[in-house]
Image: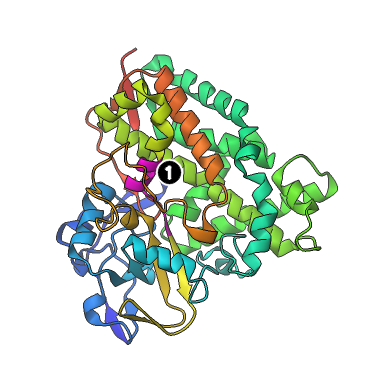
Amino acid sequence: MLKLGVSYSPRFENRGLAGRTAQVDRVAKDWEPEMQPEMPEAVIPTHVPANLVKPFPYIFGMTTREEPHRGWAPKVHAEGPDIFYAPHAYPGGSPAWVVRRMDHLREIYFDTDTFSSKDFSPFAKLIGENWTNTPAEVDPPNHAKYRKMANPLFTPKAVSSLDGKIRQYAVDYVEAFRQRGECEFMAEFAFEFPIKVFLELMDFPLDHTRQFLEWEYDLLHASDLGKIAAATRKVVDYLREQIEDRRKSPRDDIISYALAVDVEGAKLNDDELVGFSFNLFIGGLDTVSTNMGLQFAHLAREDGDQEFLRQNPEEIPHAIDELMRAYAAVTTFRTCTRETEFHGVKMMPGDKVAMSTTLAGRDPAEFDNPDKVDFGRRPRHVSFGYGLHTCIGMHLAKREMRIALEEFLGRIPQFSVKPGHQLEYHLGMIQPVTLPLVWDV
């Protein structure tokens, strides 16, 4: 085994809810292993050639003031290789193969025999339990039965029934700050608005919003496994309480539905109920917030694109797809199940594979001029996954993003990032830390 040490000592700052985060502003500048943030010494397996060991900039739990999309992704693609082994790509700072090309990602998405979705996240194992995020971490053939069970909840027709409430939530938040001429978009809109929709679906108390945000932050943005484990335990305990409550008093909500539905003639067991509910918690609390933050950050800096959508609101759905390509935020993981050679690279059982939609969305072999945002592009992106594991909540998420843009652009005049503010981003799940916007009243 090779051992790779890293020597760069990051700066730490206390950010309240954001916790203690490391600055990795120099990770991509020189693109050398010693410029990685301070991490445990990595053990490199003997089947990994030394020339394929490369740094991966999108490290869970870190923040940066560099441009993770505009700056880093083009550099990774330009310097290659197509597949490399990153010492600190998986949550907690452990290694994974990184596949940067879109066509290779699509192959992996479909080859569920070789690349398993099981345990792509560390949550259950961190607290010594055996449930899985359902259906996201379930492989065929069992995946189909869980997907069939959940599909009725998230069809376009089903989510369209929420239009009135989603729009009213958006209006309420925008009107709360419209006359001020400014807002901190992440705290005052991007986080709060999708949570209202999630609470509506789950029938959870509205006054739990702040607690959910704190748990969600530690789940998806903390670098310390102890913090991730503690947050996981709190969320799972809460979900078990809610499941037990619905057993006694069923309601018109998702947990009650999961308790009542038959899956191939049987009810979901306790682990299946927890895994299904936990998967909804993760997806419902962060995915829309993250993408909204990146989309509004782009529009705040690109007056032409903002004005185009004001003049052509019917183009908003297409614009969302292009912005999700250009600012893809998610890295998920697969686990290699057997010794295999994938495009000339030997992978062994247990190897993790990082599925970076950020890199795929900026792949120059897939998209002409990938660093240009073009609302006429109509891209086939993988920001909601691909194949059988395409995000089950995709239609709801896109509806929330569309309504948010319609109401914000319809009620707020030309807006921009507050002068003097330097954007900073969480990594892993790439997301603006704060986004102060200003406009004339």
Q: Nearer the viewer, residue 29 or 288?
A: 288
Residue 326 included in the magenta stretch of the image: yes
| Boundaries of the magenta span | 321-331
* Residue at x-position 65% and y-position 50%: 151
Q: Residue at position x 75%, y 60% from top?
A: 263
Place of residue 154 in the rendered image (x, y in percent of width and height, measured from the top left): 62, 45
Residue 280 as seen in the image, left or right of residue 21: right
Q: Quadrant of residue 166?
A: top right
Instruction: Bin the neighbour count of mark 1 within 10 Å (Cα to Cα): few under 14, some 14-19, many 20 and up.
Output: many
Which residue sits furthest left? Answer: 30
Closer to the camera in the image, 91 or 113: 113
Q: How many marks?
A: 1
386 lies above or below 250: below
Q: Residue at 49% of width from left, 39% of height from top?
A: 398
Left or right relative to 61: residue 115 = right
Q: Nearer the viewer, residue 212 or 285?
A: 285
Q: Position of residue 415 (x, y in %)?
A: 31, 23
Q: Quadrant of residue 297?
A: top left
Q: Amino acid at mark 1?
A: Thr
Question: For mark 1, what is the residue?
Answer: 290
Residue closest to the eye, 424 or 332: 332
Q: Position of residue 33 (x, y in %)?
A: 22, 69
Determine whether 342 is above or below 183 in the image. below
Left or right of residue 43, residue 73 in this image: left
Q: Residue 2: x and y, percent?
A: 28, 84
> What kind of element bears circle 1?
helix
